[in-house]
Image: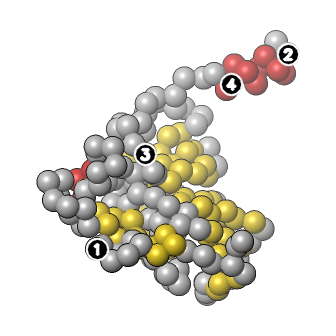
Amino acid sequence: MNKETSEREEGNRAFPDLPLAITSFGAAVVDDSIYVYGGHHGRAHHYSLTGQSGELLRLNLREPLAWRVVTTGPKLQGLALVTYGGKLYRIGGFTARNKADEDQDLWSVPDFAQFVPRISEWEQLPSMPTPRSSFDAVVVGDHLYVVGGWAMQGGEETVWQDTVCTVDLSQKVLEWSLVAEPP
């Protein structure tokens, strides 16, 4: 078997389905596992607390037999999950404060937390400067950058985020700062 055939077979390996069909979740790989956090599993474009997940799921990529719930946290969607130094970082997102039969009451959050796989629990970190959901995040070197998104605050007007915020993950004391506004 040549290298190309081996890589193609590796890419076609079957993985188990997620326990629920979800959208707007965060996902990242740490070591030999893929992690999925939060997301929406309710009716399309109708968000409620019962349709949001607060579970952190893990699939071992060496033995991909089943997704396991590792821990739980706040019910969120529209968040980001990134990795750095063998840890997961959960950033922002939004939570619905309404029941399924009520008008939507959506709130973006400034939350920032880390998860160390060997300890299996979330640790709260300093919040972002502003609440933010439906954005993107990336780690470049030691810096986490959060770009775009919006802040939903219930019935108030949605505020589009026009700044980039960053934090140096290599520091003992984490401190967010704002950098140049994107075009």
- Tell me the SS state at disc 4: helix
Give the percent coordinates (x, y) of residue 26: 50, 54
Q: Are marks 3 and 4 in contact (CB under 8 Å)?
A: no
- Which is in the foreground here, disc 3 or disc 2? 3
Q: Is residue 40 visible?
A: yes
- Residue assigned mark 1: 155
Disc on res. 132: none
Q: Is residue 156 left or right of residue 138?
A: left
As shown in the figure, which amino acid type bears the numbered disc 2? Answer: Asn
Quarter of the C terminus within the rendering: bottom right
155 and 76: which is toward the camera: 155
**Image point 76% across, 24% down: which residue?**
7
Q: Secondary structure at mark 3?
A: loop
In primary-sequence order, the first of circles 1 and 2 is 2
Q: Residues within 10 Å of mark 3 (few under 14, many from 20)?
A: some
**Residue that mark 3 sits on:** 23
Tell me, yes or no, whether the two marked residues, 1 and 2, touch with CB atoms within 8 Å: no
Image quarter where the N terminus lies is top right
Q: Is residue 167 visible?
A: no
Q: CA distance from mark 1 to mark 2?
A: 59 Å
Camera-side residue of 166 and 104: 104
Give the mark toward the camera: 3 or 4: 3
What label sits on residue 10 in the rendered view? Answer: 4
Indicate which disc, 3 or 1, sits on the residue closer to the N terminus: 3
**Which disc, if any, is residue 2?**
2
